[in-house]
Image (spheres, rainbow, N blue to C red):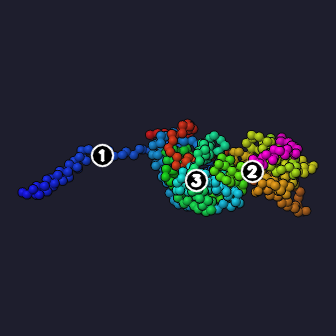
Amino acid sequence: MSRKDAVLRAIMVVIAAVTILIPVLVITNPPAMPVRRPAPRIVMPRRVVPPAELPPVEPVKFVQLAPEDARAFNASVPFVDGPNPAARPFRYPNGAEDLARATDCLAAAVLYEAGDDAVGEKAVAQVVLNRLRHPAFPKTVCGVVFEGSERSTGCQFTFTCDGALARHPSADGWRRAREIATAALAGSVYKPVGYATHYHTDWVVPYWQSSLDKLAAVHTHLFFRWSGWWGTPPAFTRHVQSGEPVVAQLASLSDAHRMGAALAEGDAAIAAAAPFQGRSLMPLASDPNTFLTSVDPGQPAEALRTMALQTCGDRARCKVMGWSDVGAMGFTLPLTSEQIAAMSFSYLRDRTTGFEKALWNCAEFKAAPPFSCMKRQVMRAVPVDAEPAAGPTPAPVPTPTPSPTPAKSSELTGVRRKPAPVATSAPSPTPTPVAR
């Protein structure tokens, strides 16, 4: 046998030995197979809110689960069957000043919630606009984004109250976020999340999840819409209000909010320098949160707002109404049509819904802020042969009536945040999580 043949035979023997040994080793030492963690059994009530009742946006309350148990439970929740229609394109309807503030509020939301990630940012933008159109939420972009930010807990988007705004993004990151916000406000739609109004990370389980339909997953986040009619397209029909608020927290990022804050500060200084010349009439005995007063059209418009804020103090609900020509009219509620038609100024606050609005009779106060003029009431003549009414015809106060919204909404955790320890707030006695 030649040396070459001997080498070939040795190679063939080695190959044959390896071919036999490998299966034997696999059989005798099988690899450890990953064991899927069973989903914990959690008992949570589920209620589909009927169309005649506005759905509550429940406060944040998490089931006490370790992150891996929460992930197992979330994986066991199926996505909703049936269609997931894309939201209708949204086009911002208000003027340039409002649009600039809305753009920067939305840009801050997508960047601080999603990080510099285009897909996550588009998903967050769509949730904000879905909330904007839904009657359970504020009716301005900045109002939706910064809802609850004045409280230490209860803010809707965590970056507005957890100190995140102290960390400035890169110039490129802010520019890209503004581009996504601009596109969303001009009709761009992120279709995968449909009409979602809620989302949370996959390592937590909020109690509100049981009453919502699971729609989509984007990275580590799960998106939900309300079950029943309130999650269908016809529920998303509310119109946007004018008057995007100035957000002082964005002054370091946004020219629109920085200029607005400076103008507001100047208006406040002017109002403080020009003392209010009106005569306080009363708070009503029938309603201690309603104040009627006389006003002087010669005073700056902002002086009336300052007066109203000082009058209302810390009240959660408050209404101030003023007339420049009080005349001999007596003041009781409900107001008559004549009293409403003669009104010069009104201020309405309802902190349970996040609503606050001041309105002026712009025929008297020509320097009133834009989009803050009262709509004058149209008096309808009563036919001569009509029977006289039993009393004065009541009419609504000419201030916008805020749509009813819940006092507190569920917290939205940042899309690209790192997993944090599960919230330690104890769940309510019912429902009770039962771990298996």
Number of numbered callouts drawn: 3
Q: Mark 1 highlights which residue?
A: 31
Front tag of 3 and 1: 3
Mark positioned earlier in the residue sequence (2 or 1) = 1
Q: Mark 3 highlights which residue?
A: 171
Residue type of the residue flagged with mark 3: Ala
Q: In which quadrant of the rendered view does residue 316 lie?
A: top right
Residue 422 visible in rendering: yes
Figure quadrant of the C terminus: top left
Q: Mark 2 highlights which residue?
A: 263
Cα gap from disc 2 to disc 1, whole angstroms: 69 Å
Magenta segment boundaries in residue numbering: 263-286
Residue drawn 89% across the image and 57% down it: 388
Report helix, strand or loop for mark 3: helix
Cα gap from disc 3 to disc 1, whole angstroms: 49 Å
Q: Is residue 18 magenta?
A: no
